[in-house]
Image (cartoon, helix red, strand yellow):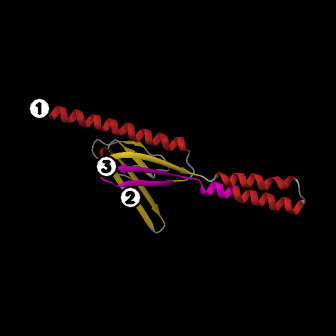
Amino acid sequence: MSEKINLLPDEKIIQTPLDNRIILTSKRIRIDSPSVGSSDLVSMTLEAVASCRLVTRSYQLLVLLALLLIIPAFLTKELYRWISIGGSLVLLIAYLRTRYATLEIASKGGGTITLRILGTKRRTIVAFIDAVEQEKMRFLQRKAICEDSSRYQM
């Protein structure tokens, strides 16, 4: 984990879900998405976080078509049975490959951290969003306490 991010003074890692592609610390959020031929590294302070959004997409019609295509497998001869089973499998694989979620974390300044996520349960992503919101509230409370104490010292 620490090789992905150099921690600031008094900063600690809170969560690293999604295969360590996104890191939540006590002061910021960082995404690191290297891929073949390109990479994306974005860091955003918790103070700058304005909103979090989760969008999920799936094509349930492919599952319905797979179910409809499997019915003839029980009613036809050997060759058509294998064609029916094969077609159903192709449709189910297409369904699994086209399901995805997109996590967007927007800043007050207009920048956005966007991460497309495959194969992660929705509740895992929602738990991460909850952790971001909780950590931002803690950060703002610590900041308010520091500002209050410096005001009284003057």
The front one of 34 and 2 is: 34
Q: Residue furthest left?
A: 154
Q: Amino acid at mark 3?
A: Lys
Label 3 or label 2, whichever lies nearer to me, is 3
Q: Residue furthest right?
A: 77
Task: Identify which residue is drawn at 38% across, 36% down.
Answer: 134
Identify residue for label 3: 108
Task: Identify which residue is drawn at 38% across, 54% down.
Answer: 112
Q: Left or right of 60: which side holds 149?
A: left
In the rendered structure, which disc, 1 or 3, sits on the residue that comes first in sequence?
3
Identify residue for label 1: 153
Task: Identify which residue is drawn at 85% across, 62% down.
Answer: 80
Q: Left or right of 62: which side holds 113?
A: left
The local crowd at label 1, few if under 14, some if 14 to 19, many if 20 or more residues have their Cα within 10 Å, is few
- Spatial separation of the CA atoms under disc 1 and disc 3: 31 Å
Q: Is 154 part of what is drawn in magenta?
A: no
| Residue 102 to residue 130: above or below | below
Q: Amino acid at mark 2?
A: Leu
| Residue 147 to residue 4: above or below | above
User: Which contiguous range is marked in magenta?
Assistant: 92-116
The image's mark for residue 41 is: 2
Looking at the picture, how far across and down is residue 3, in whole percent?
Answer: 39, 53
* SS category of the residue bearing label 2: strand
Looking at the picture, how far across and down is residue 77, in whole percent?
Answer: 90, 59
Q: Amino acid at mark 1?
A: Gln
Q: Is 97 part of what is drawn in magenta?
A: yes
Q: Left or right of 48: which side holds 152?
A: left
The image's mark for residue 96 is: none
In the rendered structure, which disc, 2 or 1, sits on the residue that comes first in sequence?
2
Q: Left or right of 89: which side holds 24?
A: left
